[in-house]
Image (tube, coloured by chain):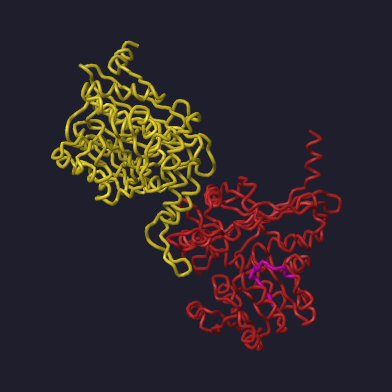
Chain colours: A yellow, B red
């Protein structure tokens, strides 16, 4: 049993705190007293502390007594918060998904003897772990991750509710998307290359480019083809593109009754209401992670399928479960001594170790987050085709 | 030759002034010196006067010397302007398409011995004239008008450019639509009952309910089925509905950085840029007016088809030609003594007279605005079907 502090009492932070509290002594810090009170109602043994993590001095003194930190602050303050945690000499699992390059903190982490496991959610997170594992076993040529958090009930016109902040979703829709093709990093506009995909248990979805490869562009430079695409119900993305292409996502202000209004801010506000997932509104997480390459001379394609649903019994969203339990798996894995390297580690650098990989899958399985593996021998398939 | 003043030097006002100046002495009044200067460049014989028609006293003194007035001011100031014109004792043709009930001015017009022909454009306008004519000849059961002003080139996402003010188009998209079914006035939301329609020379368009019946709800109470629908290229209206149904057309303010912004105003501003027809951008007007009923015991369906295009030679938009030349036809028809009743007359009350009806069609034909008539004998068709 360890003492752990979770920074952030949002949907995922709360789910993590409740999960960790089954085994550890848990404190949660957040700016919102309301969020903290809600969490305390669910488990009174959890300690809470009102804290603005942007105050580095206060953050350091708050962290001092704890064995370990879980960082689940909003993305815009993630990098600075993680830096302060590392400077405090605390081991940490981070799911704040900040835009900055995490490897800038690698030397700092080594200096302070800290283990920082970052981007440790569902995607980024579990897709990296799967990739890291098979990259260590096989010579990979292809990696693909298709992932989406979707409402169970589709409401016209957008057929979408955001299982995390709608503002972050819109940000994702405006950021150029990078993927790797023939060992070249290609940058395309967000929401490009729309394709239909059949997903088990859901039906036809639309996939499109999003900027989700993150660390693996740097850690897996030898894999020639890598891409990450976001999944949405059909029709959603066309309407977002219509908004973008008619100026609703522009950052150039327009004058409304003499006042400058930035279209992106206005549109984010309108879509926030439209896309806000209700607290007990059922949602699902669908993901398909595919790696392809040769395993001792045999060409294989290995796919992991995730179809996960809102848990009505505990009122825990699928996004909180699939993201949060990957992070709490990392916490327990570290505390059990399965991984003890010092520095900054995106999940592919943890998942590459066989015991770690299985620890993640088992930990998630115990919490009913189930990844189904499918393996296809491609060279045998090709031979069979020839025989016909 | 008469002296005529045109109020409004917009796209349609200018086209009317140029047309009337072929035969009459024409003055144009507008608030915009720029618009007036542009018109003077096209025909230096046209007199111009800068005028805010909302100033009733000034308007009256400006009108005093003229034989006749053409009113083409923006809709929001149309009713008051028409009232002032009538009070000045001036005969008038009006195409300001204001929302108020024009018959409120009927007594006033009679008192002042004024003839006011109102709503005298393409639709409302020519559809009323066709209806009025056949209503006088036949016992009608059905009237339908499908009409749209469309850009020749379709640009994603909206496939639309507004041949008049985009703000008025959006207003039309928020106003409940009335039609008559089985002699009942039915009110439906704007943009309801979307249907595909094949239009000659254009292909498949989408039609939807709009509030275009206006005066004929009152003047034709004996016709059991009457409807007016707007035409757009496929895909347009779904995107407008998506905006409406996610709150972009709401009149409830939202706070953006502490400032109240009304979504409808913001969206109008964005769509104004997106929908603004370029000055020499080619557009078309498509209309199909159908009347059905019995003509001396024979059941007939009579359809008038209009497919009109931008005139590159004179740089006159199709909407200005089809709307403006209907109004200038009314001016000349009145000046030639074909119609001399006193009061307020929507076009169905003018078109009902055989010489007036033919005057309109011929006047428009001379200006290459051509209505093609198609007549189907329905009772003979039914008899033939029986014989088979």
Tell me the chief SS of the magenta region: loop
Where is the N terminus of chain B found, in terms of image quarters?
bottom right
Where is the C terminus of chain B found, in terms of image quarters?
top right
Q: Where residue B325 appears, x then y in whole percent?
A: 62, 69
Toward the left, the furthest residue is A111
Is A86 rendered above or below residue B144?
above
The range drawn in magenta is B92-102
Q: Where residue A293 appears, x then y in whole percent?
A: 25, 23
Is A44 rendered above or below residue A136?
below
Is B41 rendered above or below residue B223?
below
B332 is within the stretch colored magenta? no
Is B147 rendered above or below residue B368?
above
Q: Where residue A283 appears, x then y in whole percent?
A: 48, 34
Res. B136 in view = yes
Quarter of the image where one finds residue A191: top left
B95 is within the stretch colored magenta? yes
The residue under the point 42% across, 51% down is A244
């Amino acid at each position: 049993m360890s003492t752990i502090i979770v920074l952030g009492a949002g949907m995922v932070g709360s789910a993590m705190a409740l999960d960790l509290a089954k085994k550890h002594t848990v404190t949660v810090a957040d700016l919102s007293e309301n969020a903290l009170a809600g969490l305390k109602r669910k488990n009174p043994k959890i300690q809470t502390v009102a804290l603005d993590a942007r105050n580095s001095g206060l953050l350091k003194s708050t962290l001092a007594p704890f064995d370990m930190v879980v960082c689940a602050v909003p993305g815009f303050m993630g990098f600075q918060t993680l830096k302060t945690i590392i400077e405090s000499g605390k081991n940490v699992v981070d799911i704040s998904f900040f835009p900055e390059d995490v490897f800038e903190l690698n030397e700092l982490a080594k200096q302070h003897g800290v283990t920082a496991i970052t981007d440790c959610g569902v995607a980024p997170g579990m897709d990296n772990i799967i990739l890291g594992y098979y990259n260590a076993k096989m010579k990979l040529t292809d990696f693909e991750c298709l992932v989406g958090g979707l409402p169970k009930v589709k409401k016209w016109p957008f057929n979408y509710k955001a299982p995390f902040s709608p503002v972050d979703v819109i940000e994702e829709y405006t950021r150029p998307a990078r993927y790797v093709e023939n060992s070249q990093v290609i940058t395309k506009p967000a929401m490009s290359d729309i394709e239909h995909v059949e997903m088990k248990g859901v039906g036809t979805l639309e996939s499109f480019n999003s900027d989700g490869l993150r660390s693996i562009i740097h850690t897996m430079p030898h894999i020639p083809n890598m891409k990450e695409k976001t999944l949405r119900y059909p029709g959603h993305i066309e309407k977002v593109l219509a908004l973008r292409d008619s100026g609703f996502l522009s950052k150039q202000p327009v004058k409304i009754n003499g006042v400058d209004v930035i279209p992106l801010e206005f549109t984010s506000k309108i879509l926030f209401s439209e896309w806000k997932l209700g607290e007990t509104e059922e949602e699902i997480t669908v993901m398909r992670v595919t790696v392809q390459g040769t395993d001792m001379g045999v060409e294989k394609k290995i796919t992991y399928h995730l179809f996960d649903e809102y848990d009505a019994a505990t009122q825990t969203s699928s996004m909180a479960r699939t993201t949060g339990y990957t992070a709490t798996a990392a916490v327990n894995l570290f505390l059990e001594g399965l991984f003890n390297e010092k520095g900054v580690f995106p999940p592919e650098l943890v998942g590459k170790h066989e015991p770690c990989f299985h620890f993640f899958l088992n930990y998630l399985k115990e919490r009913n987050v189930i990844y189904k593996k499918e393996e296809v021998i491609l060279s045998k398939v090709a031979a069979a085709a020839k025989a016909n």
